[in-house]
Amino acid sequence: ASGVRNILEERPNITEDLLGAIKEKVPQTPTRIMLAGDRGVGKSVALNQAVVHARRNNWLVLFIPNGWEHAQGGSYIQPCLMENQPFPSTVAFKSNDKVITNEDELEEMELPTEMPTDSNTVFDNHEMSAQALRGFLLAHEAQLKTIPIRDTAIMNKYTQYRLDFNEAVERIMSVQSSSQNIPFVQTRAIVEGTDAIPLLDKLDGPVLKDFNYLEFKAETLADICTFGVAFRQLAGSLFVDLVNELREYNNPNMPVLIAVDEYNNWEVPSAYSYNNQRVHAKQLCVPHSLNFLSLTKHGSDHWSLKNGMAIGTTSSRYLEGLKVDYAQQKKSLPLCVTVPYYNKTEYLSALAYYTHHDIFAPNLHLHDLLGLRTFTSSNPRLLRAQGIDFVLPLGIEYNHEATTKEAEEEDAQEMMAVKRSDLMDAKFGEEDDDEFSEEEEEVLPNTPQNKKILLARAKAKAEKEKAIEAEKAAKIAAEEARNSLKFDKPSILAYLSNKDKKFLRMKDGRG
């Protein structure tokens, strides 16, 4: 839109300087950052801006926009497949802290019936882990295909699962006499049976359209992501492998940004229990591998990134996260950046943006500019929520005094009409507002008193109809006036500079 910048670009200083410092390899710049602040100030917007800025400058960006869902969402969890450990056979569902186990149907797979539940056990929320891998692959597939796996031996632990999957496919196909030339997503759905998730299969289709599990060989980071999307049961373990690769990746031309929104929701127990014990959010694969911030200093000191930056944000959207207070644990955070409220320029720019895109309709007087700012405390979220009820008519030729006088005259006329209506109701009674019916008039005695009543009622009805017509005409005129006004950022600044310089002396920050 001409004259109105994208609202995401109005606050570039929050993250751009930090990302640029890493790009230039400034040693003093912290690589693990928390964005904090009051609810609605724009922490998520700042994080999204960091993601956009980084991707435009050839960064690899692993973005988790829904931290809460990784701890509280999904359908079930399962102990994560680790090195030299057989594939687990039990799963835990969300069921009021009650654990429901589901034994593997393949009798030939001799697997343990339960896993120990302690602080060192890592669990996989398969659906959410696969979602994170899918999103990363779709955003950076071309770049990931150029990055080889440092040690391909990490894929050896998945060999047995591939063999078991192939046996299951051959057994089912031999019984059904099916053709082998079907897409992998359909093959997986046949093997999974009632455990298949059609919605996820639809999302996986474009990613796995050329995937051949028989000939697949993992060589690049793109292969790790693809393998995790293809076999959701392995997604959590593969996500851990991917993060370990990214942490060691050291290409000065392609730094790494790890961005997690709603990070504070990883400091509390998850929605799951296993073996009658509550599972903490950071015992799940994705939060466990991205444990770059913690409430305790020793909790994340081991986490490092050779070439890049990790940013997390707090969120007040969910009750679980409200229990976490990083402000009391500042010593454990390498750097905590407090996202501020709108300053004067950002506030005006936001108003111009919302009005230009017809989110706000301009029909308020100039003094309401300060009123709205004071009412919302320049909080971006409150401005969006409460500003719907406010409109701001501004233009170079706007005559504030004339408009105010006209409005006062209209209010006075309306009050007079109301008073006349009240007097009529008091004199003749509210139940007699309507005219007499024809039958009543025929039998009504022809007395002077009745004639006065009929005349007064007719006059009141005519005035009421006239007031309704006047109100309709006023609405039409107001709508035409709004459409004719020019409201954009340059007009606001020019108007305030020329006629209301006192508004330019508003202190930056809160209203």
Image (cartoon, helix red, strand yellow):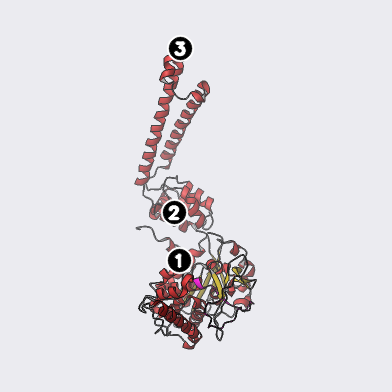
Q: Against 430, is 329 above or below?
A: below
Mark 2 vs mark 3, foreground winner is 3
Element under disc 2: helix
Image-based side of 392 in relation to 331, left or right: left
Mark 1 vs mark 3, foreground winner is 3
Mark 1: which amino acid?
Pro
Judged by its main secondary structure, the magenta piece is loop
Cα separation, mark 1 vs mark 3, equals 82 Å
Give the extent of the magenta segment: 102-127
Mark 2: which amino acid?
Leu
Cα separation, mark 2 vs mark 3, equals 65 Å
The spot of residue 82 in percent (x, y) is: 55, 82
Q: Quadrant of the N terminus?
A: bottom left
Which mark is first along the chain, 2 or 1? 1
Cα separation, mark 1 vs mark 2, equals 18 Å
Element under disc 3: loop
Which mark is first along the chain, 3 or 2? 2
Mark 3: which amino acid?
Pro
Residue bearing the label numbered 1:
12
Residue bearing the label numbered 3:
445
Q: Residues within 10 Å of mark 2 (few under 14, many from 20)?
A: many
User: Do the residues bearing badges 1 and 2 touch, measured as CB atoms within 8 Å?
Assistant: no
Q: Against 464, is 146 above or below?
A: below
Element under disc 1: helix
The spot of residue 342 in percent (x, y) is: 50, 58
Residue bearing the label numbered 2:
351
Which mark is first along the chain, 3 or 1? 1
Image-based side of 490 in relation to 381, left or right: left
Q: Residues within 10 Å of mark 1 (few under 14, many from 20)?
A: few
